[in-house]
Amino acid sequence: MSKPFIHDNFLLQNKYAEELYHNYASKMPIIDYHCHLTPNDIANNTQFENISKVWIYGDHYKWRAMRTLGVNEKFITGNASDQEKFQNWAKTVPYTVRNPLFHWTHLELARYFGITDLLNENSADAIFENASAQLNQPENSCLGLLSQMNVETVCTTEDPTDTLQYHQQFAANQDASLYMSTSFRPDKSILIDAETYTDYLKQLGEAADVEISTFDDLKNVLRKRIEYFHKNGCKLSDHGLNYIPFENFTEAEVAAIFTKRLDGKTLETSESHKFQTAILLFLAETYHEFGWVQQFHLGALRNNNKRMLSQLGPDTGWDSIGDYPQAENLSKFLDTLDTKDKLTKTILYNLNPADNEVLATMIGNFNDGSVKGKVQFGSGWWFLDQKDGIIKQVNALSNMGLISCFIGMLTDSRSFLSFPRHEYFRRVICNLFGEEMQKGELPTDMDWIGKIVQDISYNNAKDYFNFPVTAKKEAVIS
């Protein structure tokens, strides 16, 4: 009988890798400190009707693959039935060989549903019925799926206008096996050139009961929302920017630039950069005051296909890697904060692999001995969270920093079936260490290398973020 594709030693190429994974990495809990899961589903413990609902809806990784194969949009985001969408995904899967989707798909089927058959056109209907029937069992509700993967903490991502009602609801009725937090993502308040900027400011002002008519108003409102998020357990911020802008400014200049934009006038590039520099520095100093971790996801070229963007909206699969200069302005930004002793814990993610060494060396400029791994080179993100991207990020960090201080993997996902990506990451790094142990490039001290693997898998993130460990906390009501 042939061995199933997903087996105990999947991706593990020697005895050292096998021992590192099975005896050290595999049983560590998961802290998923950045994702895009919907808090509503967690708070209400959603029971998904079928596998398409939890697996295909919202997953633009799958959507891009299906479009590339020539699948009509009707069967991707359109009005086809859930079973038809699944059938078209199943038809696509065999053609994803050497794409991480092939590994993730079969890993997820195996871990959540015990299905080890390869997904294809012939197996589609049986797998759809089997997985969907399992999803209808009470133990496979939203919280059940998270529990199966030993998820201890999830940190979702919310705009400053969010009421956090579902975080409050979950905190009041929280299952002790999971802690849900949020991260504060104020990008819409920073991107002053956006067509909808003034409309957004009205929403933001309403959230804080303040009319925003000056730059000082904007700062006061953002501070109020940070205070609100903090009271509701938030410990992180997150920014998704092309690059960190940095241009010298005066407060008077920025106030005038903000007023000019409110008057409906077009800004010069230098004016936009001055405003963005000022607001980012204000936010970063406020994060430091509250003891938050700040995250910067840099380098995406978003919304490239304007025709499809107009039909489907953002985050539907039309983004790619950008080639922006990153180093100089990022250095100035971090140095300005550090000079004031207001640089909080910081995680930097890049989307362009050409910037791996840039970020791996940049973090060393600001790790000042005050905190272990204070400034982090974040894990392979988006297009880079596959085997090759993971290895390149880990190698750059190992060569130019301390991989032993790395806080490890996150899903950055909208899918409740994405948590085997942590297993995937752990298998990749165990194999990387195992291969070097076999070659004699690392000592065969299993306890020590095993400890490093456990630290990367869980312990470093636990210490870095200091989330409560499955602790029930009181809801904070506005």
Image (spheres, rainbow, N blue to C red):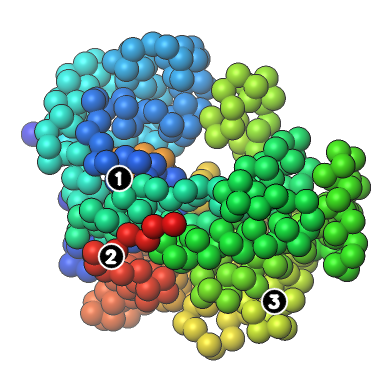
Mark 3–mark 2 CB contact (< 8 Å) = no
3 vs 2, front mark = 2
Location of mark 1 (residue):
42
Location of mark 3 (residue):
337
Residue situated in front as seen by the camera: 116 or 193: 193
In the image, taking residue 37 as reference, residue 257 lies left or right, namely right
Above or below residue 476? Residue 286 is below
1 vs 3, front mark = 1
Cα–Cα span, label 3 and label 2: 33 Å
- Residue 307 horizontal/vertical position (percent): 67, 19
Among all residues in the image, which is located at the extreme bottom? Answer: 369
Going by the numbered disc 2, the residue's amino acid type is Lys
Check disc 2 and report its element: helix, strand or loop.
Answer: loop
Above or below residue 215? Residue 468 is below
Which mark is first along the chain, 2 or 3?
Answer: 3
Going by the numbered disc 3, the residue's amino acid type is Leu
Label 3, residues with CA under 10 Å away: few <14, some 14-19, many ≥20:
some
Residue situated in front as seen by the camera: 206 or 264: 206
Q: Quadrant of residue 47?
A: top left
Which mark is first along the chain, 2 or 1?
Answer: 1
Cα–Cα span, label 1 and label 3: 36 Å
Location of mark 2 (residue):
473
Check disc 1 and report its element: helix, strand or loop.
Answer: helix
Label 1, residues with CA under 10 Å away: few <14, some 14-19, many ≥20:
many
Check disc 3 and report its element: helix, strand or loop.
Answer: helix
In the image, taking residue 434 as reference, residue 347 lies left or right, namely right
